[in-house]
Image (cartoon, rainbow, N blue to C red):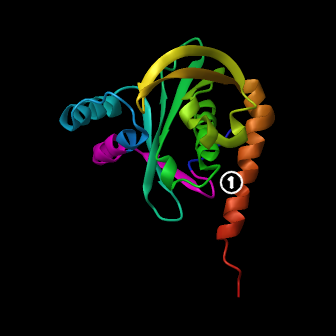
Amino acid sequence: MLVPHLETPRVSFRPATQDNADDLYDSLLSTGLEPLPSRDRFRVGFAEAIQSDATLFAMYLRSSGEVVGFGSLRDHDPAGHLKIGISMNQETLPYGAGAEAMLLLANYGFARWDYIRRVYIESTEASIARFGSAISVLRSEATLRDHVFFRGRLWDMHYYAVTREAWERGGAPALERLVRRGKRKQAPSGR
């Protein structure tokens, strides 16, 4: 049975609230995503997203408590597919924190919904590097050429996937080791 962890040694997820709308907007602006609606229209859309069937998390850097990104689980369907997405402020994240966030989201999807058979991750070249080696082991499903415009140019959108079977065999045990290591670091020394 999978445990729906929400924190690793470096990052933690908490359910997003309407209070996080401006943080997400600022995070998207910092990545260079274009075009964004006005801040007021974005707040309205964010409120609607929180009320939808999507699961939205604010991502915190555990060392500082600062909001450094957002994670979403959406488009889960009866066929057993789920999409996850991560928006991160790359300048504030230590290397590998994006991989930890991706592990948490994929695991949460498989743990939360028993019928999910495959989790899809969407990314561009602009953010793939922040996932470290975690993304390189995933199966590439598709690439949409010149699909997203931000930072003044068009970027390819890459779709990766992990199956439940592969996750239970490799991803979940890796996340469990990471979570246990983080708990050992937090334990008092007893002196």
Q: Which quarter of the rendering shows the N terminus? A: top right
Q: Is residue 15 magenta?
A: yes
Tell me where residue 157 sits by quadrant.
Answer: top right
Span highlighted in magenta in the image? 7-26
143 vs 26, left or right, is right
Is residue 108 placed above or below 9 in the rendered structure? Answer: above
Is residue 11 placed above or below 51 in the rendered structure? Answer: below
Q: Residues within 10 Å of mark 1 (few under 14, many from 20)?
A: some
- Residue at image x 56%, y 48%? 6
- Residue at image x 40%, y 26%? 53
- Residue at image x 59%, y 57%? 10
All told, the count of numbered labels is 1
- Residue 11 in percent (x, y) is at 56, 53
* Residue 115 appears in the figure: no
94 vs 20, left or right, is right
Hey, which residue is sitting farthest right in the picture?
169
Hey, which residue is sitting farthest top in the picture?
79
Q: Which residue is mark 1?
A: 179
SS at circle 1: helix
Amino acid at the residue labelled 1: Val
Q: Is residue 5 magenta?
A: no
Q: Which quarter of the rendering shows the C terminus? A: bottom right
- Residue 9 in percent (x, y) is at 63, 58
Hey, which residue is sitting farthest front in the picture?
152
* Residue 147 appears in the figure: yes
Hey, which residue is sitting farthest bottom in the picture?
191
- Residue 106 in percent (x, y) is at 62, 34
- Residue 142 in percent (x, y) is at 63, 14
